[in-house]
């Protein structure tokens, strides 16, 4: 319920309009989600000798956690040593020595900084072996559907509980101090704390199977639990449980005394802020550009949400009940209305900031799953603001709550050295104020059923918004789902080892015509002219290719494929084969998604 809901609605529309206008003229930066950039050996590479290791390079830092990286031979037997390591954005998988000529399949499932798993597969050949199709690992990296559905449910439980655990006490502090004596509100807050702890525990247990791609039967797997506990995501959820216990102790003493002391207020505020921080410091905000700004915006967003929705729940469980004194209702609504107004404004501003960061461009709103879920959430937020506007009208028209106006200025003559005298209240003014309070209380009692229905609609829509927020947390951001230009430098692999590098640029890396730039450099980083160069495109999973790309020389060591056609969506491998001289040939390759 907000006195400024129409203003917040206009602010939301204005900010979205500015973003849409800017999105037409500007291109989004890199995605805040890990993607595979290159591999060594490359996809489909044929080597004369078995490599000592396999290296995977991603767009950002990753971790193995509960995931895996495996190298299998044509019969499905593992040939890696089982001691893969992570070096920033690279995963290095050592192989056993003296591997025979054969086809080898590399499968991986790693965890990106935003706690989402990234999986895939590629293959290479040693000697005269047969290439193992990459789709032989199809389905191995899929998330279990039960786990995928249980995680958003656990997050929703935590979000709803946080609204009760923090929002109701804030309502009592700011608008209705008499509510500390309500046993019903105490039960609501206690239930909220239990829901936050349960949601955190369930999310912690499910993160392991989610990262590993396993089912519910592995929730108690010691290895998965240890991997989750060793991750930032797992630490945040365990810390959340500890903070819930500490906040429960503080609130128990408050309920026992009937009102909070200054120490209780400070301790509760610190613990509540820390709880909000554990929610904001996991998932999408910690990955990608400007993480500090993103975490701050997420924290303000979460805090505003719990204050608003928790306050609405507190009103329904307290002053909006028929047996509650009408005087309490008339006193509680104005301060909560002001508090809700600030929460709505904070929600709108931080929501737009988060949307711009995670979506990137207006086109991604209608071309990605994240974008469509976000649009559904936005539609419900608009409905929520409309319901808040209805409540504001009732508050103003029926309860006599108006915006405060400054008192008229009066000219006062000051007499030097005059003795100050205490001014006693005017009995007529006190009588008028008392009569007005009685009128407001009577109006509150008369309009309570209608106001309760309006607040109930707000709260119901808010719970659905929380559910969509829980889904968004587990959905890869739209930036990671839209076409992103490819710009990568790859080592040229020859029979004698690395010899120079090749820079590859593909824009826009989408289905249809693209522009390809290839720059060939020697070991000293200088442009070099090869005897021959060939570029091919392959989509192993769909058995497309190799497709030769027509190149035109554009300068020393520089070649352009203008209008390079990518037939359709998929994970494409671009391979560059160069003949450096009469006796030396090398290859380099990279994979890139086309959506």
Image (cartoon, rainbow, N blue to C red):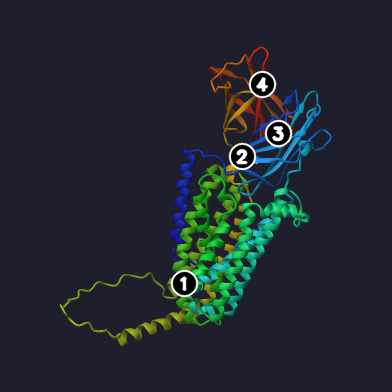
Label annotation for residue 89: 2
Could you tell me how far apart the alpha carbons at marks 1 and 4 are, in whole angstroms? 71 Å
Sequence-earlier tag: 3 or 4: 3
* Residue positioned most to the left: 416
Q: Nearer the viewer, residue 404 or 346?
A: 346
Could you tell me how far apart the alpha carbons at marks 4 and 2 are, in whole angstroms? 25 Å
> Circle 3: is it few (<14), some (14-19), or many (20+) Cα within 10 Å?
many
Q: Which residue is mark 3?
A: 54
Sequence-earlier tag: 3 or 1: 3
Whether label 1 touches label 4, CB < 8 Å = no
Sequence-earlier tag: 1 or 4: 1
Q: Which residue is mark 4?
A: 586
Could you tell me how far apart the alpha carbons at marks 3 and 4 are, in whole angstroms? 17 Å
Sequence-earlier tag: 3 or 2: 3
Query: Looking at the picture, how far across and down is residue 79, in whole percent?
Result: 79, 36
Residue 419's place in the image compared with 70, above or below, is below
Could you tell me how far apart the alpha carbons at marks 3 and 1 are, in whole angstroms? 60 Å
Could you tell me how far apart the alpha carbons at marks 1 and 2 are, in whole angstroms? 48 Å
The residue at the point 39 percent across, 71 percent down is 402
* Discs 1/4, front: 4
- Secondary structure at badge 1 equals helix
* Discs 3/1, front: 3
């Amino acid at each position: 319920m907000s006195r400024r809901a129409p203003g917040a609605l206009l602010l939301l529309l204005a900010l979205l309009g500015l973003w849409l206008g800017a999105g037409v003229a500007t291109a989004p930066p890199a995605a805040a989600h890990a993607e595979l950039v290159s591999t060594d050996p490359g996809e489909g590479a044929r080597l004369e000798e078995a490599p000592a290791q396999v290296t995977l390079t991603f767009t950002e830092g990753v971790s193995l956690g509960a995931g895996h990286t495996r190298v299998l031979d044509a019969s499905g037997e593992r040939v890696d040593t089982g001691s893969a390591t992570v070096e920033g954005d690279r995963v290095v998988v050592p192989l056993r020595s003296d591997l025979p000529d054969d086809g080898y399949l590399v499968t991986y499932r790693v965890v990106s900084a935003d706690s989402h798993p990234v999986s895939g597969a590629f293959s290479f050949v040693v000697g005269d072996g047969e290439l193992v199709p990459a789709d032989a690992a199809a389905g191995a990296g899929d998330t279990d559907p039960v786990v995928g559905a249980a995680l958003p449910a656990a997050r929703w439980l935590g979000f709803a509980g946080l609204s009760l655990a923090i929002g109701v006490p804030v309502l009592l502090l700011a608008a209705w101090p008499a509510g500390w004596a309500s046993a019903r509100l105490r039960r609501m807050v206690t239930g909220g704390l239990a829901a936050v702890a349960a949601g955190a525990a369930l999310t912690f247990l499910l993160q392991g199977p989610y990262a590993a791609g396993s089912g519910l039967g592995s929730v108690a797997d010691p290895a998965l639990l240890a991997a989750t506990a060793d991750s930032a995501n797992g630490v945040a959820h365990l810390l959340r449980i500890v903070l819930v216990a500490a906040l429960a102790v503080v609130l128990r003493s408050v309920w026992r005394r009937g009102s909070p002391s200054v120490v209780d207020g400070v301790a509760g505020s610190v613990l509540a802020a820390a709880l909000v921080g554990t929610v904001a410091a996991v998932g999408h905000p910690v990955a990608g550009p400007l993480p500090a700004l993103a975490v701050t915006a997420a924290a303000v967003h979460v805090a505003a949400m719990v204050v608003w929705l928790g306050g609405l729940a507190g009103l329904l469980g307290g002053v909006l009940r028929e047996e509650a004194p009408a005087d309490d209702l008339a006193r509680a609504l104005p301060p909560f209305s002001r508090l809700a107004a600030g929460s709505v404004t904070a929600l709108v501003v931080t929501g737009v900031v988060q949307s711009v960061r995670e979506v990137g461009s207006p086109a991604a709103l209608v071309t990605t799953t994240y974008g469509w879920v976000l649009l559904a959430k936005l539609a419900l937020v608009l409905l929520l603001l409309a319901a808040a506007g209805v409540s504001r009208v009732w508050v103003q028209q029926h309860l006599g709550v108006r915006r405060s106006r400054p008192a008229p200025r009066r000219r006062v003559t000051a007499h030097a050295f005059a003795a100050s005298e205490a001014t006693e209240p005017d009995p007529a003014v006190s009588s008028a104020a008392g009569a007005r309070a009685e009128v407001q209380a009577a109006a509150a009692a008369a309009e309570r059923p209608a106001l309760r229905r309006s607040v109930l609609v707000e709260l119901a829509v808010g719970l659905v918004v929380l559910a969509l927020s829980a889904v968004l947390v587990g959905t890869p951001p739209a930036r990671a789902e839209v076409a992103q230009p490819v710009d990568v430098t790859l080592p040229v692999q020859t029979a004698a080892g690395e010899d120079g590098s090749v820079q590859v640029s593909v824009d826009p890396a989408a289905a249809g015509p693209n522009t390809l730039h290839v720059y060939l450099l020697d070991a000293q980083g200088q442009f070099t002219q090869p005897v021959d160069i060939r570029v091919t495109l392959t989509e192993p999973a769909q058995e497309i290719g190799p497709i030769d790309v027509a190149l035109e020389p554009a300068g020393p060591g520089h070649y352009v494929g203008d209008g390079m056609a990518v037939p359709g969506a998929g994970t494409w491998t671009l391979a560059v084969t160069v003949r450096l001289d009469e006796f030396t040939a090398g290859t380099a390759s990279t994979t890139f998604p086309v959506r």
